[in-house]
Image (cartoon, rainbow, N blue to C red):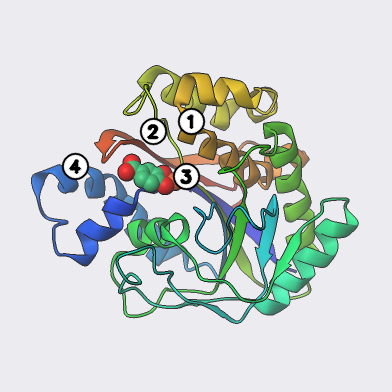
Amino acid sequence: MARITASVYTSHVPAIGAALDTGKAGEPYWQKVFAGYEFSKQWLREQRPDVVFLVYNDHATAFSLEMIPTFAIGCAAQFKPADEGWGPRPVPEVIGHPELAAHVAQSVIQQDFDLTIVNRMDVDHGLTVPLSLMCGQPPAWPCPVIPFAVNVVQYPVPSGRRCLNLGKAIRKAVESFDADLKVQVWGTGGMSHQLQGPRAGLINREFDNAFLDRLIADPEGLAAMPHIDYVREAGSEGIELVMWLIARGAMGDLAGAPPPKVRHRFYHVPASNTAVGHLILEESNQ
Ligand code: DHB
Ligand code: FE
């Protein structure tokens, strides 16, 4: 049976991808960001997951105001890096896992979550930047990736409670897939940032660190936080953080297993307009 071995949480920022792609990663400003991922890259090489289930948000790239799925699962065999205005990033194509994705879709929809099935989609910085942070600049990504897009761009957005429960349903789905696969679930986006309006540039270190504490130790309590609190405390784009609850919900302790091990935690301000947060939780039985 397939099993979930770990969850990974990380912010995304387009400028992180641009820094890598244009050879600026060694500059002191960016070194402070990438230093937080040195452990993680080594850890990922050692872990060798068979599939990454990558929860992220599209930024009106594949979707638009014309079509706004709340939850969309990528079932294709491959996904191209999107052109977000400067040409596609020079990163590998994402190889999907259509069999596992179709199984998760079947299982999660039968558990009463309405997923949109996506059979063709380009993936933007929301997905490619977390891969770059965790993998560096390889000629191919180390394993297949299932893109799972969440609408946090256009209101109404899903609640924290729904995201946590969706993570639990994804765990059940993975565990009922009849193949011996090690699966990681990644939750991405956040932390505090606001890109527009009078509060543009907002960062809230206290909120971010309390969020990390509660994500580790009190995910059920954290899931009760209403979306307006994300926006008030973490800025209009801080609502991206709600996606981290999907990955957290997929961890075993919420189904009765012992708490996960915190393998790595990192926080740094700023990367562009954003506070970068990063966490690795490993299942206790690993
Ligand atoms: C930035 C952050 C984001 O989450 C995003 O989608 C775009 C830009 C930024 O900080 O520049
Ligand atoms: Fe974003």
The residue identified by callout 1 is 236
Q: Gap between marks 4 and 3, in whole Å? A: 19 Å
Mark 4 residue element: helix
Q: Amino acid at mark 4?
A: Lys
Q: Gap between marks 2 and 1, in whole Å? A: 8 Å
Badge 4, how many Cα within 10 Å: few under 14, some, many 20+? some
Q: Amino acid at mark 2?
A: Gln
Foreground: disc 3 or disc 1: 1
**What residue is at 30 percent from the left and 36 percent from the top?**
273
Q: Gap between marks 2 and 3, in whole Å? A: 17 Å
| Residue 125 place in picture, x, y as percent | 41, 58
Q: Mark on residue 189?
A: 3
Q: Gap between marks 3 and 1, in whole Å? A: 12 Å
Q: Is residue 121 left or right of residue 27?
A: right
Tell me which numbered mark, 4 or 3, is placed earlier along the sequence. Answer: 4
The residue identified by callout 2 is 196
Q: Are marks 4 and 2 in contact (CB under 8 Å)?
A: no
Which residue is nearer to you in this view: 25 or 89?
89
Foreground: disc 4 or disc 1: 1
